């Protein structure tokens, strides 16, 4: 028995309270006086991990493994080897990680007993199949691990395996089954049943699963829960980078862009400190997205470059940045390349809305329609959520670009309704701008102005770059000779000697749309040529 008040006893108490810095300090002090027993050495290693002390964590785990081997405790030694291997895997050290997992399997086989560690050994195999795109086999292996966990009453393995199986079912388009498993795995986390490291892994994994399912509501709810978990451990370092990435993503959708930028920068710093390059790359990408939406294009480009350097593919944000810079063909080529090398449904669903937007501007109606049709197919069964909103907005944009405002109208109204229901003000306002154009082209100037006014208010609050474009698509003013602001802008560029292709690039429109504006200008001004339109513009002081 240890006397109350000793460093060891107080260190254990701090561990129970998740006071990681005190746990590490006190148990290290106790260890210096008398080498810790395996169970306390494990607590010290966990504290090191939660504080982001990765070298210390690895040294302590290797020491624990050696102590267990020396004592002939093969199964505990295998368990420790498993966690060493998994940590190396997540740090990008695939060879050493594979070596430790192989050692863990060998120790289990050498022991020969029927133990829960056999279930743990199934997880790296499942992750391998996930990485190769064989989601069915990964789900099957995770299900086998669930059986081991239930038979031996191992809550950590149950949560790990259940959330992995749920994620794999989501990737197989079995979202309702998968999301139920993800939710169930979170129950044990929220109730405090799991060990600290497993709690963090499951929190982040479940949120990623919700994002893959495009379930924005669930992602928001579990992100809030993860934030509370992190905030309850004041000196926690591990998982806080990923947590802040999730918070930044939610804040971006919520329209809290200033807070999103701060969270993303903090996430980037913490992820780099925690050696989580994947999380750091996503944090840099989120920064790029917010900066692009604010019109800070140079800063956005720097952020996307940083994301790329950290291993995060910067599409579709990079292509939309190039579109905003007027480099339409560059944007189109980037998205074609990204789509060509991705056959994963979730990844394509993230790329296709941008592809529709870029191809509309590029005047490639066939490719825009094909992308829209594929997106609608992916969204089948999810018409009420984020995927449904993306698909409806894409359909409206395609019909509008093809001169079919009547066909565009119901899709755009649906998009606005869905985005509003999801509390995504920026996306809702972008859909309202398209809706305004459709109303105007159908002759309903009052409705066009109402939709545009709603969008303007939101863009002003957000500081969105779209605000600068609104005047160009507003309904006509009395002294504009019947021309809309967009038509006036086109006329001024014609008078400056621009070709339709140059106008399309400068205004981020398709050539077909520019041609339609030119036809409207000729009819309204009662002229029949570009030179006559130019003369009219100068005569009536429209330039």
Image (cartoon, grey):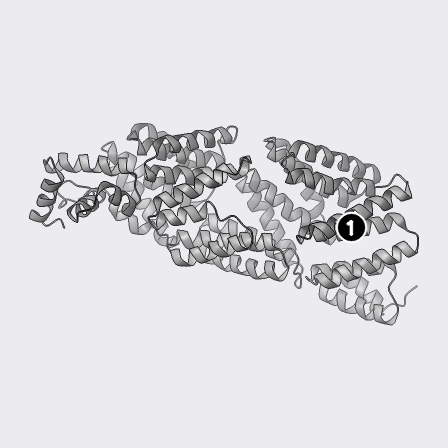
Q: Please tell me which residue lies in front, 150 or 143.
A: 143
Relative to 13, is 209 on the left or the right? left
Estimate the x, y position of residue 421 in percent, counting from the top left.
Answer: 46, 39
Relative to 308, is 175 on the left or the right? right
Residue 522 versus residue 256 in the image, above or below:
above
Q: Quadrant of the N terminus?
A: bottom right
Furthest residue toward left: 539
Near mark 1 (Cα within 10 A), the count class, few <14, some 14-19 or many ≥20, is many
Q: Please tell me which residue lies in front, 479 or 335.
A: 335
- Dividing the picture into quarters, in which one does residue 352 lie? top left
Residue 419 in view (yes/no): no
Label 1 SS: helix
In percent of the image, x 9 and y 35: which residue is there?
526
In percent of the image, x 83 and y 36: which residue is there?
151
Estimate the x, y position of residue 322 in percent, counting from the top left.
Answer: 38, 49
Q: Which residue in the protein does label 1 denote?
A: 100
In percent of the image, x 62 and y 55: which residue is there?
276
Residue 123 in view (yes/no): yes
Estimate the x, y position of residue 419 in percent, counting from the top left.
Answer: 44, 40
In percent of the image, x 64 and y 33: which residue is there?
169
């Amino acid at each position: 028995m240890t006397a109350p008040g000793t460093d060891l006893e107080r260190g254990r108490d701090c561990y129970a309270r998740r006071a990681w810095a005190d746990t590490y300090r006190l148990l290290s002090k106790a260890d210096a006086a008398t080498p810790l027993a395996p169970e306390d050495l494990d607590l010290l290693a966990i504290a090191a991990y939660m504080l982001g002390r990765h070298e210390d964590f690895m040294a302590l785990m290797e020491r624990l493994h050696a102590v267990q081997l020396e004592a002939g405790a093969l199964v505990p030694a295998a368990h420790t080897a498993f966690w060493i291997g998994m940590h190396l895997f997540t740090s990008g050290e695939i060879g050493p990680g594979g070596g430790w997992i192989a050692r863990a399997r060998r120790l289990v086989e050498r022991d020969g007993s029927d133990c829960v560690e056999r279930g743990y050994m199934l997880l790296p195999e499942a992750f391998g199949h996930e990485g190769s795109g064989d989601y069915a086999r990964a789900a099957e292996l995770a299900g086998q691990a669930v059986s081991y966990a239930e038979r031996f009453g191992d809550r950590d393995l149950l949560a790990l395996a259940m959330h992995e199986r749920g994620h794999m079912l989501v990737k197989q388009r079995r979202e309702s089954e998968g999301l139920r498993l993800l939710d169930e795995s979170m129950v044990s986390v929220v109730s405090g049943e799991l060990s600290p490291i497993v709690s963090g892994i499951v929190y982040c994994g479940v949120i990623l699963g919700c994002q893959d399912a495009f379930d924005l509501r669930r992602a928001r709810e579990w992100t809030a829960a993860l934030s509370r978990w992190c905030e309850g451990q004041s000196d926690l370092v591990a998982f806080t980078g990923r947590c802040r990435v999730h918070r930044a993503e939610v804040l971006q959708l919520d329209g809290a862009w200033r807070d999103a930028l701060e969270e993303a920068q903090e996430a980037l710093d913490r992820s780099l400190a925690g050696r989580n390059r994947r999380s750091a790359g996503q944090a840099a990408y989120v920064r790029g997205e917010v900066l692009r939406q604010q019109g800070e294009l140079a800063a956005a480009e720097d952020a996307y470059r940083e994301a790329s350097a950290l291993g995060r593919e910067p599409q579709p944000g990079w292509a939309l940045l190039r579109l905003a810079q007027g480099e339409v063909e560059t944007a189109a080529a980037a998205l074609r390349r990204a789509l060509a090398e991705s056959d994963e449904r979730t990844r394509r669903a993230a790329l296709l809305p941008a592809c529709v937007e870029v191809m509309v501007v590029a005047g490639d109606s066939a490719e825009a329609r094909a992308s829209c049709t594929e997106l609608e197919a992916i969204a089948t069964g999810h018409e009420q959520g984020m995927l449904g909103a993306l698909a409806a907005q894409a359909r409206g944009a395609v019909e509008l670009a093809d001169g079919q405002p009547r066909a565009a109208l119901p899709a755009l109204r649906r998009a606005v309704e869905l985005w509003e229901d999801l509390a995504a003000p920026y996306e809702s306002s972008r859909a309202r701008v398209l809706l305004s154009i459709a109303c105007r082209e159908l002759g309903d100037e009052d409705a066009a102005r109402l939709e545009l006014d709603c969008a303007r208010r939101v863009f002003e609050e957000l500081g969105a770059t779209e605000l600068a474009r609104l005047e160009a698509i507003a309904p006509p003013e009395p002294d504009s000779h019947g021309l809309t602001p967009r038509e006036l802008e086109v006329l001024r560029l014609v008078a400056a000697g621009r070709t339709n292709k140059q106008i399309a690039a400068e205004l981020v429109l398709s050539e077909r749309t520019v041609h339609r504006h030119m036809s409207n200008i000729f009819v309204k001004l009662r002229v029949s040529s570009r030179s006559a339109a130019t003369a009219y513009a100068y005569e009536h002081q429209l330039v």
